[in-house]
Image: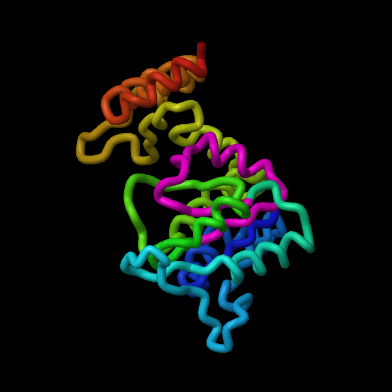
Amino acid sequence: MRIDILTVLPELLESPLNHSILKRASDSGLVRICVHNIRDYSTDKHRKVDDYAFSGDAGMVIKIEPVDRAIESLRKERKYDEIIYMSPDGERFSQKMANSLSTMENIIILCGHYKGIDQRVRDYLITREISLGNYVLTGGELAAAVIADCIVRLLPGAISDETSALTDSFQDNLLAPPVYTRPAIYRGWKVPPVLLSGNEKKINEWKMKQSIERTKKLRPELLDRHNDDSG
């Protein structure tokens, strides 16, 4: 898999992309993540990529030309399944969406910055807009790192126990059940006996019950989706 990230501040992505699962997956050849500085595609002698909004609103807007040149350059080399723009008014990111994106071969993630990006980029060049939630970040770089992390950890071989990702919260629209490890008793606080029983059927039943109860308490809106998918 290949992920190309377009940004005006590539430095913001150096740390999240070069540690933990993302680094291991890159080193092993499971994924190639390439960060491109949009300024490299500017025709301005000062590598300027933003300008004032025609509407007179406060804040600078990323121009269409360098973004178009960057995307065009990448598309000459390969076909992309999605060209994603990180935007607070995009569709809400979900585990289901991460699962879908993890099956793709090549994607581009465009990070917004400043006041935003020329609307024509969104109208003519982008295939999908994604938001992490109802809030605004300084730029799309951190959001792009989150998307990349969610996608890459789902790739076969990215984590040592591949079944682990399949039991994460939200995979079936339920929160994950509680987890415990040794010691079985600490300060008198005990691990639920069923988890020590070795009875796989009872353990699975306990996990499902806990998932449903936790979801009902903490994220009740997810239960409707779970029931729809189950039915």
Q: Quadrant of residue 42?
A: bottom right
Q: Is residue 96 left or right of residue 103?
A: left
Report the front residue among 202 and 158.
158
Q: Quadrant of residue 187?
A: top left
User: How many numbered dots are placed on residues in this image?
Assistant: 0
Residue 132 in picture, x, y percent from top left = 42, 47
Q: Is residue 39 left or right of residue 168?
A: right
Q: Residue at x 48, y 36 (%)?
A: 168
Establish if 212 lies above or below 43.
Answer: above
Establish if 208 lies above or below 103.
Answer: above
Establish if 194 lies above or below 41.
Answer: above
Q: Residue at x 50, y 61 (%)?
A: 118
Q: Residue at x 32, y 29 (%)?
A: 219
Q: Residue at x 68, y 61 (%)?
A: 32
Residue 4 is a magenta residue: no
The extreme top residue here reads 231
The extreme bottom residue here reads 45
The extreme left residue here reads 187
Residue 96 is a magenta residue: yes
Report the front residue among 38 and 20.
38
The extreme front residue here reads 55
Q: Is residue 157 left or right of residue 11?
A: right
Residue 31 in picture, x, y percent from top left = 67, 56
Residue 6 in picture, x, y percent from top left = 57, 65
Q: Which residues are magenta?
A: 83-111
Residue 91 in picture, x, y percent from top left = 47, 41
